[in-house]
Amino acid sequence: MPDVSRLAQVRARLDLPVVRRAAGLLEGHHRSVYKGHGQDFDDLHLYAPGEDVGDIDWKSSARAGIPIVRRFVRASNVNLVLVVDTGRSMAAAAPSGETKAEVASLCCALVAYLARDRGDRVALVAGDADRVVQLPPRASTRDLEVLLRTVDRLWHPGAPASDLGRPLDRALTAFRRRSLVVVVTDEARPDAGHATLLRSLRVRHEVLLVRVADLSPVAVDGAGGARREVADVDGGLRLPPFLRGRAALVQAAADAVSRRRAEVAQRLTDLRVESVLVAGTDDVVPRLVELLGRSARARR
Amino acid sequence: MWVAVVVAVAVVGAVAWWLARRRRVRERDVLWVANTGYLATVPAFVSWVRRYRALQGLAAVSLLTAVVGAGAVAARPVETDVVVDRLGTRDIVLCLDVSGSMIEYDGAVLRVFSELVDSFEGERIALSIFNSSSRTVFPLTDDYALVQEELQAGVEALDEDPADFDYTGGSDDADILVFTTFTAGTTANLAGASLIGDGLASCALQFDEGAADRSRSIILATDNYVSGEPIYTLPQAADLVSSRGITLHGVFGGSARYEGTPEETEYRQVVEAGGGLYFLADDPAAVQGIVDDVVAQQAVELDATPEVIVTDTPTAWFLVTVAGVGLLLVVAWRVRQ
């Protein structure tokens, strides 16, 4: 997976939202996240209109001749909690043709990578209707690797049904300290039943939601699609080739899907939870950039 | 035996089903999708599913049609015809003596032939009645509607003995009219009565000369009791008959006590000399058997063993099969595409 080079490209633009902004230099609790990771000048950037004038680093500005902002992130050990839906619906196909698990896996890896880069510790709560897997916050590369592999193993079509409520509930009870919670699930969730949990979670933590889109079953067509059987992981649907690739049907299904997406988006807006919909691994980086940018603006 | 066949078919079916199912599991190449519950609420999808089910049903029906058609074709549907075409070359003249004593026998002969006519195919039949003179009721013809009509008229006219009529009371006037209408013209020659030779000779003239390729026979019913002076005696008339290649079959109507009388003896000799069958019937009910014997004899002479012609008629079932297979192909193509 060529995500490393892509990461290198976006790393300069990508930053996880901070839990709480530093109050000032004198508190002594701050250091640049990138310190110790080389000469990354992401923490010094050109002043843009709208930014806090107090953030301008005057020495650097004097050297450069233009206003330069120096940003600090609180060095206190922030936890990043990955709440992952491991229900069997995650093993289904995404619009890109990959499985949603592959897309979600890249999302998790990207988020974990960014957190590690910043020195944050990453914890895991993965769960579905039958299982809840919890890993304590860890910061080392090896631990993150273990975490990501653990999640990968949980995703397969024979897994129990999806139930986002269980990992959300566990995250709510297990993590008391204010953390950044990144929920990875699919486009049909959260549903109305998760609203209360999400609201509680939002009060205590910073919550971001990454939703992986579903492949429209009636749109499966072509040489590869015609040979394969299309079935719902939860049963109840088995699509013969006869019912696939019909333009009118695809359009009608797409309308229904966009109605459902609008419904979920409205629910998340009401909860004031930032979320993003990802269609494939190619889509992960731009969508996450968009999400993180939005959440940064939202806190400002 | 049948149980074994049924069990074998069931076992083969179960094994085939199991193999198909295993193959399906092994070659499972499923593209999994999720959260598709919304599809059931999309009207376009519901209507397409309904169309798909209808096509599946149609495929099943056409498969059944093809299987039934193929089975029927494999069973070789045939048409069997029993053809006795040689008997169809017969010409038969019924030559009936309608003098008083023979009325009952004549009625029986007519009744038997009115039944036989129904199975005639190509036979020609004529009816000539005589007493002192002859009347041709109908000439040799294969117009079976006419024949049947005339035979029925004869049966009706002859089913009562004219000796029993009440000629003065008027109560039997209708029957007397029917009888006299049917026998009209048979007593024109006032010089005698029951002129057997003349009647037989005129019957012999019923046959047309040209149709020599047809078998000719006369069935004569008489008691050979002549009164008056005939132009042809019975032996002379029999010579005429044989000279025209006609076989004469004789029915002597009368009780057994007439056996051996000169009339009966002459009649028998004349008939047997011509190679025909001779019967002495003391009961009109025996006429059925007599006619059967005559027909059987003719069948032997004409070598007319019934021939069973078996014709394969697969066309209809073949078309059914083709239609079923064609429909199946179209539907399968439609479903697969």
Image (cartoon, coloured by chain):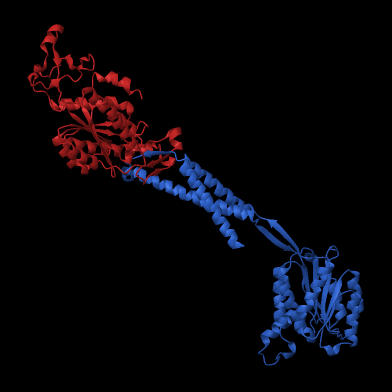
Count of all numbered marks drawn on residues in the image: 0
Q: Is residue B183 visible?
A: no
Q: Is residue B312 visible?
A: yes
The correct choice, above or below, for B316 with respect to A42 in the image is below
Outermost residue on the bottom side: it is B169
Q: Position of residue A82 (x, y in %)?
A: 24, 33
Dividing the picture into quadrants, the one containing residue A116 is top left
The one of B72 and A107 positioned closer to us in this rendering: A107
Q: Position of residue B187 (x, y in %)?
A: 80, 82
Chain B is which colour?
Answer: blue
Quarter of the picture holding the N terminus of chain B: bottom right
Chain A is which colour?
Answer: red
The correct choice, above or below, for A127 with respect to A286 in the image is below
The correct choice, above or below, for A271 with respect to B226 in the image is above
Q: Residue at x 77, y 80 (%)?
A: B287
Q: Residue at x 90, y 75 (%)?
A: B238
The one of A43 and B50 positioned closer to us in this rendering: A43
The one of B173 and B329 positioned closer to us in this rendering: B329
Q: Position of residue A297 (x, y in %)?
A: 16, 25
Instruction: Judge from the rendering whether residue A265 lies leftward or rightward of residue B220; answer left or right.
Output: left
